[in-house]
Image: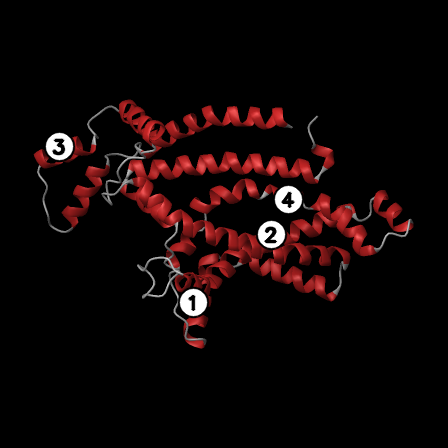
Amino acid sequence: MLVFIAKRFLWMIPSLFAVSFLAFVLIQLPPGDYVTTYIATLAASNEIVDQNTAAQLRERFGLGDPMLIQYFKWMWGILSRGDFGISFEWQQPVSDLIWERMALTLVLALSTLIATWAIALPIGVYSAVRKYSIGDYFFTAFTFFGLAVPSFLLALVLMYVAAVEFGQDVGGLFSPEYENAPWSFAKMVDLFSHLWLPVIILAVSSTASLIRVMRANMLDELPKPYVTTARAKGLSEFRLLMKYPLMIALNPFISTIAWLLPNLISGSVVVAIVLNLPTAAPLLLQALMAQDMYLAGAFVLLICALTLIGSLISDILLALVDPRIRLE
């Protein structure tokens, strides 16, 4: 297992370089660059920028260099100084913009994961054990609802209910008085008082899908001979479920870690925009639209790194939980 982990770490290095280069190229494939987008924005406001000013802006941002030179300069700054460059649009270091958003994104994603697992796991087991019961039909209807309703529509409905029926401030993760305040215990309490709405919205669709997966996996395991043998030996039903079929049926839950980490950045863009959440996804979308290549490239590089790390964690946990897939 240690050899497998070491090999995966070594393969992560060239993978990161390859994906970062492809991302850097793809960001610059659309016609023009950030200066072109900036000039178009000014033109929409009846402000004219002459060619000399545009050339000076390109020289200032280093956009006059060949793309390969720009990439190597960017990567050398990351490797030597941990410098991801300066955001063209925000005129701030990219690292400051990323970590400012990532902390809140991490809190939101982990809260959603805990809520999803806490709901989907027991309901999936219940639906499998009580197959075709009234409860099973009820939860099946819930899963179809969760899969069918778009997240942004659910966000709009819950925002209306929270604002009109309960008089709660919706939109964002903080009240106005805490939005720019330094971190304190009161600010953390305010954060968690606003966190329930996006957690419910983001958890509904993922919970619905995992319930169906857990139910299907448990139904596959329950009729198998080892379950019948354990039951015949007098093992209680609860211990039987917890010790054998549930551990095997957990595989898809653990596998979700591989896409959970990159989903911290790229997932739920529409919901984050509707709820005005200060997370990473809206900033990534804005950077791509503005062709802010250093900011967008840093996000894509981080998504790649989190995908590789998530896949490694998922493989290790799967090997620990399921003896059938352990590596010798």
Label annotation for residue 55: 3
User: At 46% across and 46% down in the image, what residue appears?
Assistant: 264
Sequence order check: which comes first, mark 2 or mark 3? 3
- Location of residue 167 by image quarter: bottom left
Q: Report if residue 147 is visible in the image.
A: no
Asked if disc 2 and disc 1 are in contact, CB closer than 8 Å, the reply is: no
Q: Residue at x 44, y 64 (%)?
A: 189
Tell me which numbered mark, 3 or 4, is placed earlier along the sequence.
3
Using the numbered discs, state the Cα–Cα distance from disc 2 to disc 3 in whole angstroms. 52 Å
Q: Indicate the quadrant containing the C terminus: top left, top right, bottom left or bottom right.
A: top right
Secondary structure of residue under mark 3: helix
From the image, tell me which residue sits under label 2. Answer: 209
What is the CA distance from the residue labelled 2 to the residue labelled 1? 24 Å
Say which amino acid is labelled 3. Answer: Ala
- Contact, mark 1 vs mark 3 (Cβ under 8 Å): no
Corner quadrant of residue 94: top left
- Evaluate if marks 3 and 4 touch, with contact meaning CB atoms under 8 Å apart: no
Q: Disc 1 versus disc 3: distance between alpha carbons?
A: 46 Å
In the rendered structure, the answer to whether residue 136 lies left or right of residue 186 reads right
Quadrant placement of the N terminus: top right
Cα separation, mark 1 vs mark 4, equals 32 Å
Question: Which residue type carries mark 1?
Answer: Met
The disc at residue 159 is 1
**Residue bearing mark 4:** 252
